[in-house]
Amino acid sequence: MNFKFAFCPIILLLSASLSFAQNVNGVIHGAASIAKTDDNFVCVTLDWWPAEKCDYNQCPWGKAGILNLDLRYGALINAIKAFNPLRIKVGGSLQDNVVYKVGEVSSCPNFMKREDSLFGFSQGCLSMERWDQLNRFFNHTGVKLTFGLNALFGRNESQTEKGLWIGDWQPQNTRDFMQYTISKGYKVGSYEFGNQLSGSRMGAKVDAKLKNLVKELYAITKSSK
């Protein structure tokens, strides 16, 4: 997928025009490519927000969140296929509130509004039944997948420093989820550890590492083939 742009000369000419108060004519050579955008640049996010997510008295999410999205909706399927290839990230703001119903996790709570929780919602859950449905959808549409993992599992927010999460990250739920994913042959191109946890807009700060876990599990998968 090639995109051809020639914006830089225009910006320079506009700057000159503002500085010297002169009229300047610009010429764009549309046949010449100055840069190429990789196909992997095209990416969309399937977010966890429930229908109850509202801002400024508007509640626009409806059934568009990961847990409620109609995966059989023809217009959605056709739109995704039209991009081919398209990378989809499963994640977003609430990914650090999500547990995976696999292994030792038996309960699967729904997101509930709770003002004292991260982003105003309680812990939510991804069942393996829904994960199976999502992967059938991904396979059918041919997308490349990035999955955002919960980097705060087992941690608690500090009572003395806002935005600081303390305690050790507990990897067992993530390990069980990844092992299930591998056992089913689901293709995850990459994992994201936490949703922009170091960003200024989020406040949560963590130092837990996922690298060794990924190396361990996927090395076992390769050696068993």
Image (cartoon, rainbow, N blue to C red):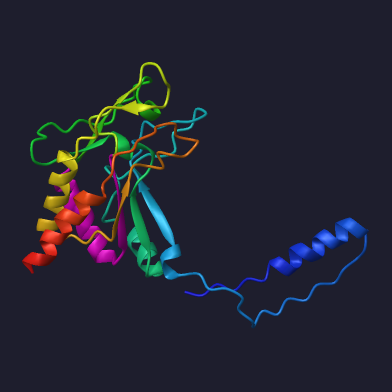
Q: Residue at x 28, y 44 (%)?
A: 209
Residue 217 image-quadrant placement? bottom left
Which residue shows up at 49% across the image and 35% down it? 201
Q: Position of residue 99 (x, y in %)?
A: 21, 37
Q: Position of residue 160 (x, y in %)?
A: 40, 16
Q: Residue furthest right?
A: 21
Q: Nearer the viewer, residue 173 or 94?
A: 173
Q: Quadrant of residue 170?
A: top left
Magenta highlight on residue 115: no
Give the vertical position of 217 relative to 149 (above or below).
below
Q: In the image, residue 127 lies at what x, y percent?
A: 16, 42
Above or below: residue 184 compared with residue 38 = above
Report whether residue 196 is seen. yes
Q: Position of residue 184 (x, y in %)?
A: 11, 58
In this picture, which residue range is highlighted in magenta? Answer: 127-150
Q: Is residue 132 magenta?
A: yes
Residue 197 vertical placement versus 216 (above, below): above
Residue pictured at 53% horizontal, 73% vertical: 36
Residue that protrudes farthest toward the bottom in the picture: 31
- In the picture, the quarter occupied by the C terminus is bottom left
| Residue 184 in view | no
Number of on-image labels: 0
Please report the residue visible at 20 percent of the width from the left and 30 percent of the height from the top: 109
Left or right: where 217 falls relative to 42: left
Q: Is residue 13 left or right of residue 163?
A: right
